[in-house]
Image: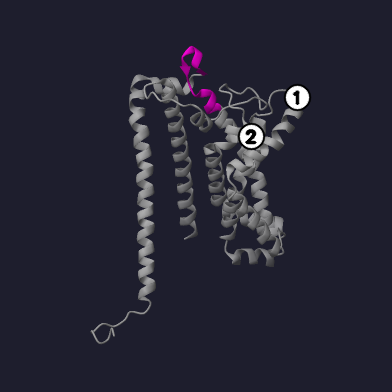
C-alpha cells in the first residue's frame, strides 16, 4: 500500500519511532526534575538572603536549641547529623567493600547471583521497616547493655543506618568492579594471581573512582535519612557528648518542629536545616559527577 502512494517503507521505522518517543519522554523527565530542583533552591534562597543580611543565618547555625531561653539554633542537630553519618559510613564502608570483593572475585557464580538478589532486595525494604524492627529488638538490648536511659541513642542508630546504606554501596561497588575489562582479569589469572592479589593489584587500582562514588552516595543517603534517626536516636536537641547519648539530626528536627508562623524562629530553624541539607547534598553530588566524568574519560 505504501508503494502505491509512492512511499517506500523504512525498515525498523516503528522501532526508531518508539526509541525517539522514549528519548523525548526521558528528556522531559530530566527537564522536570531539573526545574523542580531549581525551584527548591529558589525557595531556599528567598528565605536565605534576608537571614544572611540580618546576621540571623549564622546565629541559628552555630547556637544551641533552647526555646525557653529564646534560642533556636541548630548546632546540636548539625553535630548529631555529622556524627551519625560519619560513624555509620565508617562501619558500613569496609563491610560493603569486602562483600563486593567476595561477590566479584571469590564467590561461585550461583552464590554470586543469590547474594546479589539479596542485596537488591534489601534496597527495596522501606526505611521504616528497619527502624520498626530495631525499635523492638535492638533498643531493649542497648538499654540492657548501657544500664541507663531509654536505649535510644547514637550507638543504637549507627548499626541500623549502616545496614540501610550498605546495599546501595555494594551494588555500586560490584558494578564498578564488573566494568573492568575481562582481558585484564584473564591476564591476572594466566599469571597465577590469587583472588586476593587480583583484588589488590587489578580491581582496586582500576575501580577506585567507582569506590569513591559509592562512598559518596552512601554518605548522601546517611545524611538524608529521617526515619532511623527519628525512631532510634532519641531526639534530644543537645550536643551529644558520647555515643550513648540521645541526639536529634537535622532531618528529624525538620520532621519534629511544627511552626505555622513564617516569621517565628522555629520556622527559620527548620528552613536553615533544610538549606544545610540541600547544600551538603549538592556538594556530594557535584563531587560524584566530577569523579564519574574523570573515570569515564580515563576509560575512553
Q: Quadrant of the N terminus?
A: bottom left
Q: Is residue 75 left or right of residue 93?
A: left
Disc 1 packing (10 Å; few <14; some 14–19; many ≥20): few
Q: Nearer the viewer, residue 94 or 153?
A: 153
Q: Which residues are magenta?
A: 65-79
Q: Quadrant of residue 83?
A: top right
Compared across the picture, whether 85 is left or right of 286 comes to: right
Name the residue furthest top: 69
Residue 139, image x, y percentages: 69, 32
Reading the image, the residue beneath label 2 is 157
| Position above or below: 207 against 250 | below
Residue 200 visible? The answer is no
Residue 113, picture quadrant: bottom right
Spatial CA distance of label 1 from label 2 is 17 Å
Front in this rendered view, residue 243 or 249? 249
Residue under the point 71% across and 59% down:
107
Which residue bears the numbered disc 1? Answer: 147
Residue at 66% from the left image edge and 63% from the top image edge = 188
x and y percent of residue 46 in the render? 33, 31
Q: Secondary structure at mark 1?
A: loop
Amino acid at each position: 500500500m505504501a508503494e502505491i502512494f509512492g512511499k517506500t517503507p523504512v525498515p525498523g521505522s516503528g522501532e526508531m519511532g518508539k526509541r525517539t518517543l522514549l528519548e523525548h519522554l526521558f528528556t522531559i523527565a530530566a527537564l522536570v526534575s531539573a526545574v523542580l530542583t531549581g525551584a527548591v533552591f529558589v525557595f531556599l534562597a528567598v528565605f536565605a538572603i534576608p537571614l544572611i543580611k540580618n546576621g540571623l543565618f549564622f546565629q541559628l547555625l552555630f547556637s544551641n536549641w533552647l526555646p525557653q531561653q529564646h534560642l533556636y539554633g541548630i548546632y546540636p542537630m548539625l553535630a548529631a547529623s555529622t556524627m551519625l553519618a560519619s560513624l555509620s559510613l565508617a562501619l558500613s564502608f569496609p563491610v560493603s567493600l569486602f562483600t563486593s570483593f567476595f561477590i566479584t572475585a571469590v564467590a561461585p557464580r550461583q552464590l554470586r547471583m543469590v547474594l546479589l538478589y539479596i542485596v537488591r532486595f534489601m534496597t527495596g525494604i522501606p526505611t521504616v521497616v528497619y527502624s520498626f524492627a530495631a525499635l523492638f529488638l535492638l533498643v531493649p538490648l542497648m538499654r540492657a547493655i548501657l544500664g541507663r536511659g531509654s536505649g535510644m541513642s547514637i550507638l543504637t542508630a549507627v548499626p541500623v543506618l549502616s545496614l540501610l546504606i550498605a546495599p546501595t554501596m555494594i551494588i555500586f561497588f560490584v558494578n564498578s568492579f564488573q566494568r573492568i575489562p575481562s582481558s585484564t582479569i584473564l591476564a591476572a589469572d594466566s599469571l597465577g594471581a590469587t583472588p586476593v592479589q587480583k583484588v589488590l593489584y587489578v580491581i582496586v587500582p582500576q575501580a577506585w573512582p567507582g569506590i569513591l562514588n559509592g562512598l559518596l552516595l552512601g554518605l548522601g543517603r546517611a545524611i538524608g535519612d529521617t526515619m532511623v534517626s527519628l525512631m532510634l536516636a532519641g531526639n534530644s536537641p543537645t550536643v551529644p557528648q558520647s555515643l550513648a547519648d540521645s541526639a536529634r539530626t537535622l532531618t528529624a528536627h525538620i520532621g519534629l518542629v511544627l511552626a505555622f508562623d513564617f516569621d517565628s524562629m522555629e520556622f527559620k530553624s527548620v528552613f536553615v536545616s533544610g538549606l544545610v541539607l540541600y547544600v551538603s547534598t549538592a556538594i556530594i553530588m557535584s563531587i560524584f559527577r566530577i569523579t564519574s566524568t574523570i573515570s569515564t574519560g580515563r576509560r575512553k
